[in-house]
Image (cartoon, helix red, strand yellow):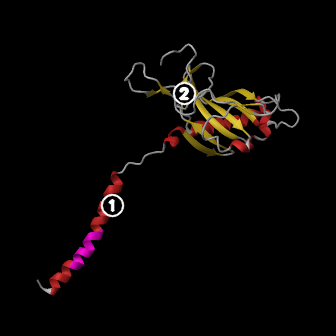
Amino acid sequence: MSNFAVLFNVNTMKRIVPFILLVVIALSAKTQEYVVPEEMLYVIEVTGSNYHGFAFNKDWEVDFYIENEDGRYTPTNDDIAKAEELIQKRIAYLNRDHENQEGRCPIIDEHIRKYERQYVGFTDVFGHHIVWVNFLWDETISDKLSKDIVLTEGGCGRYWRVKVNVDLEKVYGLEVNEAGKVKYIPRVVKPGPRISKPRKPGHPQRVRKTGVKPNPEELTF
């Protein structure tokens, strides 16, 4: 083989090998599936005009109910934006009696931008979508708000809750904590998505559809 032929083959290989490597890398990256971290499936950070908080997936276990509850759903960004708009328009009237907001306790509608939010979605027996919103003005627990629902007693106007029927555009059920030292209510159940127990040995576990705590008389799923 001539020196020219050898030189030609070497130069050709130098060009081909990098190209082959790029093709292999590209195909490998394409075949890999992106796996969403588990925590992202159940808690989503939301930010909008004058509000910031965390929305919890429909399968997240909670320790409370709403009236006429039929199940759970995951609030969408549009639902949360609509709920916030309705709250900010109507909270002053809803809070006109300033219950538990005397003395040094803040009047909630005058400081609504100060509060971090937690959002939980419910459905009722009429098919309506209700967003339960938890308001907390407490810098000491800011790192806990994305990990679980925070329920409290005491602390007056720094802790309150309200419900929004996004279908009927109704804001109702305002609850403001009483005055006194704030107390964080411990969870009755473990935080996270509810996993039902199999009825019989060997049956696979499944996520409970509603994600809510069963009624006391409910013995099986």
Report the residue that reaches farthest toward the bottom: 3
Residue 15 lies in the magenta-colored region: yes
Residue type of the residue flagged with mark 1? Ile
- Within the image, what quadrant is residue 154 found in? top right
Residue type of the residue flagged with mark 2? Arg
Quadrant occupied by the N terminus: bottom left
State the residue position of label 1: 25
Residue lying at 33% horizontally and 59% vertically, measured from the top left: 26
Judged left or right of residue 205, residue 164 is: right
Tell me where residue 42 appears, x and y as whole percent: 53, 38
Mark 2 vs 1, N-terminal side: 1
Residue lying at 66% horizontally and 39% vertically, measured from the top left: 117
Report the residue that reaches farthest toward the top: 217
Report the residue that reaches farthest toward the right: 103
Label of residue 72 in the image: 2
Label 2's element?
strand
Compute the Cα span from label 2 to label 1.
43 Å
Looking at the image, is mark 2 or mark 1 nearer the viewer?
1
> Which span of residues is magenta-colored?
10-18
**Front-most of 31 and 172?**
31
